[in-house]
Amino acid sequence: MVKNDYEEAPFAAGMNFDLEEVEPFLKRLSSSILDSGLSQNEIHTIQSEINTMKEDHEEKDMGTYSVVFKGQPTKIRIQAEIHIEDVDKEVVLYMYSTQELVDVIDEEMMKIEEEREF
């Protein structure tokens, strides 16, 4: 099997989310940053997969998705890791792609972090 650059790329953005923040964040990325992002169905599938994760520190590859960024077709690979404390479930979302797209995703994640502080 031939590995594509994005699968081996060291470029990743990652951030902790509460379970209910994942879907809105993916919708936000798809509508504000990407020319053509994740479909509603893909976002729903990712959220559903995360909901099934039950073990603390469980990691799961959510898949590689075709998107369009700045007019160029590219791929985003998404991984999720969950952390469970008492009854609270937190999700660490990792997104792998090209350096430029990862930088933009990272900026969006920083905006979310800033919004949380208010």
Image (cartoon, rainbow, N blue to C red):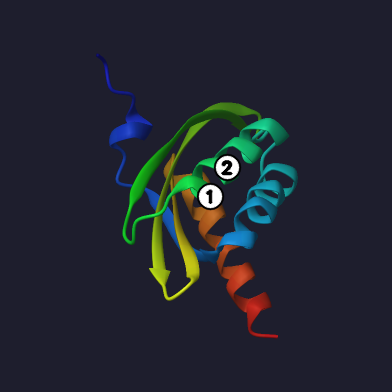
The residue beneath circle 1 is 51
Residue furthest out toward the left? 1
Within 10 Å of disc 2 (Cα), the crowding (few <14, some 14-19, many 20+) is: few
Q: Secondary structure at mark 1?
A: helix
Give how far across and how far down residue 7 sits, in percent: 33, 33
Instruction: Verify CB contact (< 8 Å) between mark 1 and mark 2.
Output: yes
Q: Amino acid at mark 1?
A: Asn
Q: Residue at x 48, y 46 (%)?
A: 52
Q: Residue at x 67, y 40 (%)?
A: 34
Q: Quadrant of residue 40?
A: top right
Residue 102 vs 68, above or below: the answer is below
Task: Give the label on residue 63, or none.
Answer: none
Q: Is residue 114 left or right of residue 54?
A: right
Q: Amino acid at mark 2?
A: Ser
Residue 53 vs 85, above or below: the answer is above
The quadrant of the rendering that contains the N terminus is: top left
Residue 63 vs 3, above or below: the answer is below
Q: Is residue 71 left or right of residue 1?
A: right
Give how far across and how far down residue 32 sits, in percent: 73, 48
Q: Residue at x 75, y 44 (%)?
A: 31
Query: What is the C-alpha distance between the residues marked 1 and 2?
Result: 5 Å
Q: Is residue 61 left or right of residue 118?
A: left
Q: Quadrant of residue 24?
A: bottom right
Nearer to me, 56 or 101 = 56
Q: Secondary structure at mark 2?
A: helix
Residue furthest out toward the right? 31
Give how far across and how far down residue 91 sits, in percent: 47, 60
Nearer to me, 35 or 44 = 44
The residue beneath circle 2 is 48
Residue furthest out toward the top? 1
Q: Residue at x 34, y 56 (%)?
A: 55
